[in-house]
Amino acid sequence: MAFHKSRKNCEKYSHNGYCYVKDKESADGDRIFWRCDERGSGCKGRVWTTSGEAREFLRLVTDHSCSTTGDAAKVAVQKAITTVRYRAATTMENPVQIRSTVIQEMSTAVLGQLQNKSALRKVVRRVRNKQQNAPQNPEDRSTLMIPPDYSRYEYEPGAYENFLLADSGEGDQERILIFGRESFQDFSHLIADLYVDGTFLVCPALFFQFFVILARRNDFVLPVFYILLPNKTEITYRRTFQMLRELWPALNPDSISVDFELAIHNAIRIVFPEAHIRGCFFHLFQNLKKHLSAENLLNHYNQNPEFALYARMIVSLAFVPQNDLLQALTALENYLPQELEQILAYFTNTYIGRIRNNGTRAPPTFVPSSWNVYTRTINNLDKTNNYCEAFHRKVQLQLGVSHPTIWKFLDELKKVVKVSDAQYEQFVGGHNAPRKRRKYEEADERILAIVNRYELGTVIEYLRGISHNFKIA
């Protein structure tokens, strides 16, 4: 099984010799529904896969009528054409060189179905002609000029609004570009909760990081800003947030959910001093796993269920009421196996504060109020920043390549924004927001039940109970 791109840059999936085109995602975003690419013949073949990068096959929903057996050679040819298009777009190779590279590992059965040299030459020409219609890719971001077609957004046929909302300016070596729906400013005063996260893989080569900011509207969480950053310094984050405040003066969120990156936390405290910083529990757990790996304990974690439970008890401290945190830490220090001593020490130093020689506790890198989720759980507030993670995956899948040109990035980003427009209209139309998968809802319900009976057991029982559940929460 694998996935590749069609001529129109749509994602295609192959399984058991059949090719499928993407139909849609499930409401919860965890599955993708695919239909046979021979739809013109009346075939109703359909399959489901997971939405992750691996595209794991889930089930055959409807059998094929186009053929009783799959055609592995046809699938291989389509993958080869995808490679031809990619090399035409990303290399200076001539058509003969591209064809030579592509056929190196093909079997004779596949070679017999591959298009002839003339047809492949036309494929290369079409790709490169389309690229030539885009502006030339600048050598550095300070000289970048955004043409009108890329700085505006067509929200309805023939109706446009600004898409480039803010630009730190030509000549700025630390250039910051902020894109988004101009009309969304109309509800900026209603935004109470923001979700912020950055990614590097899909960012155009001229920039360092692609930053997305989403806003909660009732049960919906919608993207509002798409930002290209030159680096990940505190100064840049501060400039970015200040540009947002100037852009939307009425924006004054109660909370901002972010990763555990100190530069972002510091910038938020300066620009949005009244906002409560909510560290993402998922990233808290991921940081723990990074330190398990650094201590050569990750394989042990993956292979030993009891050890994994012990390790998760460390981050389960996030579910303890803040006033009881030190008491719970002491109990955990006396309970965990010695091999986790260094991991617990890292967690204590970073998130609680180490004990100084004079007996006082040093300030932690991240204060407990930023990562404690006890009150969030009681009040049914978000414990993670997974909305941003899901949006980054959508952009990555739409692009199909890492570090695209700025023009390809903006073209494909607008397509993702159009999908988000549909979600916004669902909110406006009074529809229910997409629900979590049932197993996640059940895990949340169990965690809430454990939190509600916090005072009815020992702290070790409490931490073990939480640890049994959050790995799927």
Image: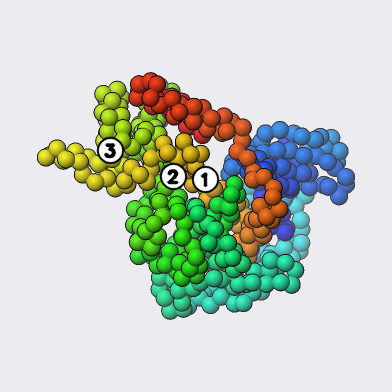
Q: Quadrant of residue 457?
A: top left
Between residue 437 and residue 325, name the one nearer to us.
325
What's the amino acid at mark 3? Answer: Thr
Q: Is residue 109 left or right of residue 270?
A: right
Q: Residue at x 28, y 40 (%)?
A: 352
Q: Are marks 2 and 1 in contact (CB under 8 Å)?
A: yes
What's the amino acid at mark 2? Answer: Cys
| Numbered label tally | 3
Place of residue 318 in the rendered image (x, y in percent of width and height, measured from the top left)? 38, 36
Q: How is the image coloured?
A: rainbow
Note whether residue 373 is visible. yes
Q: Secondary structure at mark 3?
A: helix
Place of residue 219 in the rendered image (x, y in percent of width and height, measured from the top left)? 59, 47
- List the residue tagged with mark 2: 280
- List the residue tagged with mark 1: 386
Mark 2 is surrounded, within 10 Å at the Cα level, by few (under 14), some (14 to 19) or many (20 or more) other residues, namely many
Q: Residue at x 19, y 38 (%)?
A: 355
Q: Tag on residue 348? A: 3
3 or 2: tag closer to the N-terminus: 2
